[in-house]
């Protein structure tokens, strides 16, 4: 398959799974992506052999076409990829790496089933076939799989103790389990029927049957409402909403971090403008390569403050920005200010589990740049782009603030 062949394909900029197919429509390779368009394009870079391997380059040359299946989230793409690889065992997936090092997810066949992550090489040594109720995997990307489990854990409470529940011999171990119940990590004690339902829901989720799971939850919600168990109905409703709007920011970030050297560096710059706390606004500007991408500039009316507080306003802007995982993620974030603004931005990123370098541009009293607070490597490679992005953010913020102030005065 060539770049010219790819140019004829309409690929969506959405999460999903892609399939490279051979001359007889046989599946050669299956992968998952945050953006199907960007991910598939990356296989046609000139340095594919260096970035991937000679084996993957051979696969692309042998492929005749590529097909895709879209998913609602990166998490679901990860699960679908795993299930499809296990079903079809494509030639180039099974040869690309020794799957004994991959993670597997198992649900034990016990009175209180445990949900455990096990390495492929340890699977048969630790468990017999009869001891495993359900088995999912292998999951090739360990980092993404760990992020996926964090998301799943927020939706479903399950046990992952080292030993079967009820076999604890020390008060320390029992105390640890009780503590995990209290903080909501483990299920409430004793309700076996509810826990069996949780295990069923986990199975459906990891089988890629999210719609069936949602259908069952809606049925449970209606039943709870009918018996006037409104708190239970509300709890189920929140779980349905979470499933329908999976916020996998960390997954997207990790996926893009792994492949970011294949894409043009994206810089996002942020600034806040106001007059003594009035008409406070924030903005985001974008540079890709060395060019402003004005179609992706964003404006934010500050909603959480009634007085002047630049760092709190910056935090609000960043939190609202990263509530949009569908927007492309940046490789560099630029803030206008000094240590306070840089620390505020890094605080938000840490809270969201994102690893993105933050650069601060310090100005003099005439708002001229006097220092770029960044690593020597970032300064040497991107200082011009950082300053341009910052200047665009300041210009855009001032213009938006004046617009709001004028409207208020006119009204």
Image (cartoon, rainbow, N blue to C red):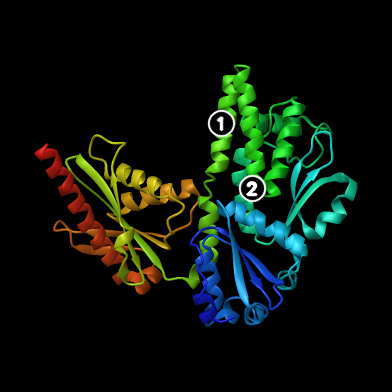
Mark 2 against mark 1, which lies toward the viewer?
1
Query: Are the two marked residues, 2 and 1, in contact with CB atoms closer than 8 angstroms?
Result: no
**Residue farthest to the top, as pictured:** 228
Rendering coords of residue 388 (x, y %): 26, 67
- Circle 2 sits on which residue? 149
Viewer-closest of 305 and 107: 107
Viewer-closest of 200 and 356: 200
183, above or below 350, in the image: above
Residue 394, which numbered label?
none
Rendering coords of residue 231 (x, y %): 57, 22
241, above or below 96, in the image: above
Rendering coords of residue 119 (x, y %): 76, 57
Q: Earlier in the sequence, mark 2 or mark 1?
A: 2
Please name the residue shown 86% across and 55% down the image.
124
Please name the residue shown 67% across and 50% down the image.
208
Q: Residue 313 is drawn in which quadrant?
A: top left
* Secondary structure state at the residue bearing disc 2: helix
At label 1, counting other C-alpha atoms closer than 10 Å, the crowd grade (few under 14, some 14-19, many 20 or more) is some
* Secondary structure state at the residue bearing disc 1: helix
- Circle 1 sits on which residue? 237
Rendering coords of residue 343 (x, y %): 37, 50
Q: Is residue 284 left or right of residue 198?
A: left
Q: Residue 159 is drawn in which quadrant?
A: top right
Q: Is residue 307 left or right of residue 120?
A: left
For the C terminus, the image quarter is: top left
């Amino acid at each position: 398959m060539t770049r010219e062949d790819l140019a004829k394909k309409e690929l969506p900029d959405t999460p999903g799974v892609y399939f490279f197919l051979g001359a007889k429509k046989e599946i050669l390779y299956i992968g998952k992506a945050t953006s199907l368009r960007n991910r598939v394009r990356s296989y046609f870079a000139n340095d594919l052999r260096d970035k991937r391997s000679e084996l993957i380059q051979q696969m692309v040359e042998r492929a005749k076409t590529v097909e895709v299946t879209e998913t609602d989230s990166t998490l679901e793409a990860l699960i679908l990829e795993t299930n499809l690889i296990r079903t079809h065992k494509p030639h180039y997936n099974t040869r690309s790496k020794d799957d004994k090092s991959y993670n597997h997810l198992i649900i034990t066949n016990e009175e209180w089933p445990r949900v455990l992550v096990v390495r492929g090489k340890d699977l048969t040594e630790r468990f017999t076939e009869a001891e495993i109720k359900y088995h999912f995997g292998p999951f090739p990307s360990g980092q993404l799989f760990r992020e996926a489990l964090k998301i799943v854990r927020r939706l479903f409470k399950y046990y992952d103790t080292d030993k079967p529940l009820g076999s604890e011999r020390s008060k320390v171990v029992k105390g640890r389990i009780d503590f995990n119940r209290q903080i909501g990590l483990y299920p409430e004690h004793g309700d076996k029927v509810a826990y069996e339902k949780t295990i069923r829901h986990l199975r459906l989720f990891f089988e890629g049957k999210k719609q069936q799971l949602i259908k069952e939850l809606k049925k449970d919600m209606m039943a709870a409402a009918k018996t006037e168990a409104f708190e239970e109905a509300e709890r189920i409703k929140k779980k349905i909403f979470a499933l329908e709007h999976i916020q996998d920011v960390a997954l997207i970030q990790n996926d893009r971090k792994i492949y970011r050297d294949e894409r043009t560096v994206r810089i996002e710059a942020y600034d806040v403008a106001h007059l003594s706390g009035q008409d406070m606004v924030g903005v985001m500007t974008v540079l890709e390569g060395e060019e402003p991408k004005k179609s992706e500039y964003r404006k934010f009316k500050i909603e959480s403050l009634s007085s002047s507080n630049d760092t709190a306003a910056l935090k609000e802007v960043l939190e609202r920005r990263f509530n949009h995982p569908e927007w492309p993620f940046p490789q560099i974030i630029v803030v206008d200010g000094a240590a306070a603004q840089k620390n505020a931005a890094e605080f938000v990123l840490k809270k969201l589990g994102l690893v993105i370098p933050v650069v601060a541009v310090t100005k003099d009293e005439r708002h001229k740049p006097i220092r770029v607070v960044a690593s020597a490597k970032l300064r040497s490679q991107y200082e011009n782009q950082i300053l341009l992005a910052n200047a665009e953010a300041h210009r855009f913020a001032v213009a938006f603030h004046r617009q709001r102030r004028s409207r208020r005065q006119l009204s």
